[in-house]
């Protein structure tokens, strides 16, 4: 299982973006229903990352999961990048670009 870093997250995003039809719908549904569980099922966070992940409320995961799910279903550009914020722990920033 991949570690939880920007490179691995972008690899997973690319895999999701290449899915078609029912396969994409299934993954998007899993993300919308349980983003935290999806993270644990697809990545291997270290102990510090686990503590941070477990501190986030279920409401936040629900909101983010729904947004990400819709982004994948609508084929929006989704990219993970290093956060520019200086912090003890490097953050992963997910950007969704909407084209009109």
Image (tube, rainbow, N blue to C red):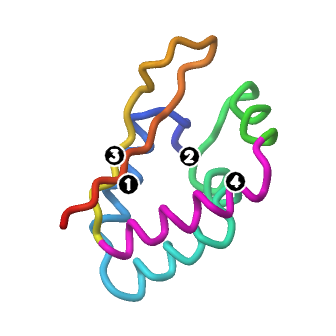
Image coords of residue 22 (percent x, y): 41, 88
Q: Per the image, is 24 magenta?
A: no
Image coords of residue 90 (percent x, y): 54, 20
First in sequence, mark 2 or 4: give its number: 2
Measured in 3D between alpha carbons, the distance from the residue under mark 2 to the one under mark 1, in whole angstroms, is 15 Å
* Rendered image quadrant of residue 94: top left
- Residue under label 2, please give it: 1
> Would you say the magenta stretch is mainly helix, strand or loop?
helix
What residue appears at the point 54 percent right and 36 percent down from the top-left corner? 3
Q: Is residue 64 above or below residue 86?
A: below
First in sequence, mark 4 or 3: give its number: 4
What residue appears at the point 64 percent right and 57 percent down from the top-left corner? 41
Question: Which label is found at residue 100?
Answer: none
Q: Is residue 82 left or right of residue 50?
A: left
In which quadrant will I find the C terminus? bottom left
Measured in 3D between alpha carbons, the distance from the residue under mark 2 to the one under mark 4, in whole angstroms, is 25 Å
The answer to whether marks 2 and 1 mark residues whose Cβ atoms lie closer than 8 Å is: no
- Residue under label 4, please give it: 60
Measured in 3D between alpha carbons, the distance from the residue under mark 3 to the one under mark 2, in whole angstroms, is 20 Å
Viewer-proximal residue, 84 or 18?
84
Measured in 3D between alpha carbons, the distance from the residue under mark 1 to the one under mark 3, in whole angstroms, is 7 Å
Q: Which residues are magenta?
A: 56-74
Measured in 3D between alpha carbons, the distance from the residue under mark 4 to the one under mark 1, in whole angstroms, is 20 Å
Image coords of residue 60 (percent x, y): 69, 53
Q: Is residue 20 above or below residue 92?
A: below
The answer to whether marks 1 and 3 mark residues whose Cβ atoms lie closer than 8 Å is: yes
- Residue under label 1, please give it: 13
Q: Is residue 52 left or right of residue 19?
A: right
The answer to whether marks 4 and 3 mark residues whose Cβ atoms lie closer than 8 Å is: no
First in sequence, mark 2 or 1: give its number: 2
First in sequence, mark 3 or 2: give its number: 2
- Residue under label 3, please give it: 79
């Amino acid at each position: 299982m991949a570690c939880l870093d920007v490179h691995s997250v972008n690899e997973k995003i690319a895999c999701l973006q290449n899915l078609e039809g029912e396969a994409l719908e299934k993954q998007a549904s899993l993300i919308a229903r349980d983003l935290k569980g999806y993270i644990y099922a697809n990545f291997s966070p270290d102990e510090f990352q686990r503590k941070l992940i477990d501190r986030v409320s279920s409401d936040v995961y629900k909101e983010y999961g729904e947004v990400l799910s819709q982004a994948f279903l609508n084929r929006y550009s989704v990219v993970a990048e290093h956060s520019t914020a200086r912090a003890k722990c490097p953050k992963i920033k997910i950007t969704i670009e909407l084209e009109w």
